[in-house]
Image (tube, rainbow, N blue to C red):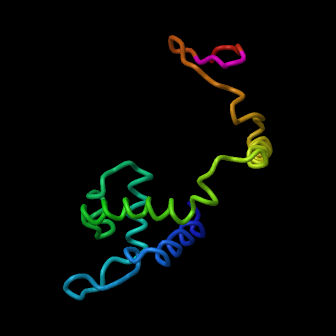
Amino acid sequence: MSKTLFLHIVNTLAAREEFFQERPDAIDRQGLTTLQKCTSAIRQLATGQTSDIFDEYLNVAETTGHECLKKFCRGVCEAFSAEYLRKPTTNDCQQLLLHHEACHGFPGMLGALTACIDNGRITSRHGGGNT
């Protein structure tokens, strides 16, 4: 994830959700930063590991890490769903196809090959050869 995208998500969540704002904890010590909370959630999503693995790395306890993940997912969906979590339009698909063809030289990434595995061989939907 680019730094710009990460900071955009962090700043959006901090502006919308009190949980992601930096504030003192129960004994008036500075609590976790917005960056710590969002990093914990993204690391859990990226690695599939439980929140307790990041305790030493980010100083985020297991229960707090779990709460970060839940609130991060809910916050991202609420903040960005109208623009990003929608079905792609015809124009979106065309843009993806053009970009992928230009970068990878493989036209038709959105469904040209529907592979199925049959006895360890991969065949295409169009009856192509085995790999």
Q: Is residue 26 above or below residue 63?
A: below
Q: Position of residue 49 (x, y in %)?
A: 34, 50
Closer to us: 108 or 56: 108
Q: Position of residue 5 (x, y in %)?
A: 59, 66
**59 lies left or right of 130:** left
Q: Position of residue 52 (x, y in %)?
A: 26, 58
Q: Is residue 13 above or below residue 83?
A: below
Viewport quadrant of the C terminus: top right
* Residue 53 sits in quarter: bottom left
The residue positioned 69% from the left and 31% from the top of the image is 111
Give the farthest residue toward the bottom: 28
**104 lies left or right of 44:** right
Give the farthest residue toward the top: 119
Whether 110 is among the magenta residues is: no
Q: Main secondary structure of the magenta part?
A: loop
**88 lies left or right of 99:** left
The residue positioned 50% from the left and 78% from the top of the image is 15
The residue positioned 25% from the left and 82% from the top of the image is 25
* Residue 1 sits in quarter: bottom right
**45 lies left or right of 116:** left
Q: Which residues are magenta?
A: 122-126
Q: Position of residue 67 (x, y in %)?
A: 31, 63
Closer to us: 34 or 78: 78
Closer to us: 88 or 94: 88
The residue positioned 72% from the left and 17% from the top of the image is 126
Count of all numbered marks drawn on residues in the image: 0
Q: Is residue 65 above or below residue 27?
A: above
